[in-house]
Amino acid sequence: MFPKEAEVVVIGGGVIGSSIAYYLAKAGKDVVLLEKSHQSGEASAANAAFVWTITRKPGIDVRLAMHSLELHLKLKDELEMDFEYIHNGGLLIIEDEKQMPLVKAHVKKRAEDGFPLEIIDAKQTLALEPLLSKETTIGAVYSPIDGTTNPIFLGVALNFQAKQLGAKIFHHTEVLDIEVERRKVKGVVCNKGTIKTDTIVNAAGCWGHKIGAMVGLKVPITPFQLAMLVTEQLPPCVFHPIMGASYMVEEDAGKAGGLGCGLIVSQQTSGNLLIGASWRDAGYDKRIISEEIELMAKINVKAMPALKDVRVIRSYANFFPHTDDDLPILGSVDAVEGFIMACGHNGHGVGMGPGTGKLIQELICDGKTSISLDELNLSRFQLK
């Protein structure tokens, strides 16, 4: 039966929304989770599957990533279902000497902030990942704590546990409007009925601006397409999540439009390799163009020549919610009492999902958070 009221309604059923619902249910809250698509139907099912900290910048960015990584570890024991989380280290591959100054500057700033990284040479890198090219590999940034997960399984595991704790979860349930009276949220109107509530969490990812508009807010989140390739199942051959330093360089320089592509490789527990990634401004179009597939194949084969004989069985694309400063929008909104933002993670929603979920639970239940969300508030864009 569709509920008529709830203490909290979470809009968006990806890893972020599912994490919020899980932690709220664990804290004893009467929570309802609404998802317009099927389970793990959007970005949480189509990404690089990284739980990643290497490229996170000093300050709030890396603190959010580290906080969430700790919770991934705890969820392995808390959740009944296995979500294939492996944390055996990650590698940021340096393939051009021109990348070294930026990489060294990043490592230096991280060390100054208390989150050191290690730069290793080509010999050490190749010992960790023998398939990498001896001709193009100069070295790498190594982090022993990074890893991969199965984001679809993670979403399912969170949903299952949240339901066991009393959460009500509805898929194929579209939010049509939000009721507001005297600048306070009062209810959520959707295609299955209206739920009266005093607290709403906007965890709608790339659709976060549409949910924000329902309460009169301008939320500066836009979709940015991310595409990946999936190979046939292989014996263990890639032992760490791998990212090319060119990805960080281009990401830091800003996405100026057109087609971008960087080295991304990891191997799932099933044996399939996830390789990519390409990105472009395509609106809400999930279709992959041939240029993306060709460029991803070219970049990955250059980095790992043995991949030229591996069959690609499918490709996928979805969108990550982009903000101008590459940071999420988290926390209460001053203009509308009871409306909380939890989206805009810029392609790191899987890795940062559990951390976001716990912080939003703390905000709702305790009125304060273990990591300050002040600099992530929506108001930072309104002040510009």
Image (cartoon, rainbow, N blue to C red):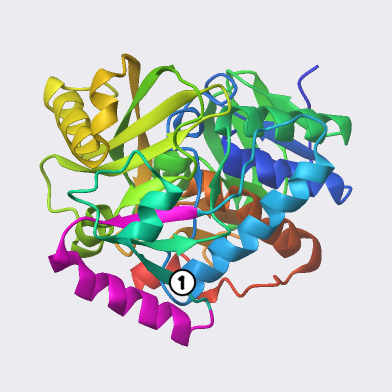
Give above or below for 366 relative to 30.
Answer: below
Q: Give the quarter of the image for residue 58.
A: bottom left
At x 43% / y 29%, what residue is drawn?
A: 46
Towards the viewer: 33 or 117: 117
Residue 100 is one of the magenta-drawn residues: yes
* Magenta extent: 90-114
Give, as a three-letter code, the residue at label 1. Leu
Residue 130 is one of the magenta-drawn residues: no
At x 58% / y 58%, what residue is drawn?
A: 145
Residue 107 x, y percent position in the rendering: 38, 75
Q: Give the quarter of the image for residue 193.
A: top right
At x 49% / y 41%, what residue is drawn?
A: 239
Tell whether 9 sits left or right of 79: left
Residue 356 x, y percent position in the rendering: 61, 55
Give above or below for 289 relative to 55.
Answer: above
Residue that carries the numbered disc 1 in the rendered image: 117
| Residue 4 seen in the figure | no
Residue 60 x, y percent position in the rendering: 50, 73
Towards the viewer: 129 or 21: 129
Tell whether 328 sits left or right of 29: left
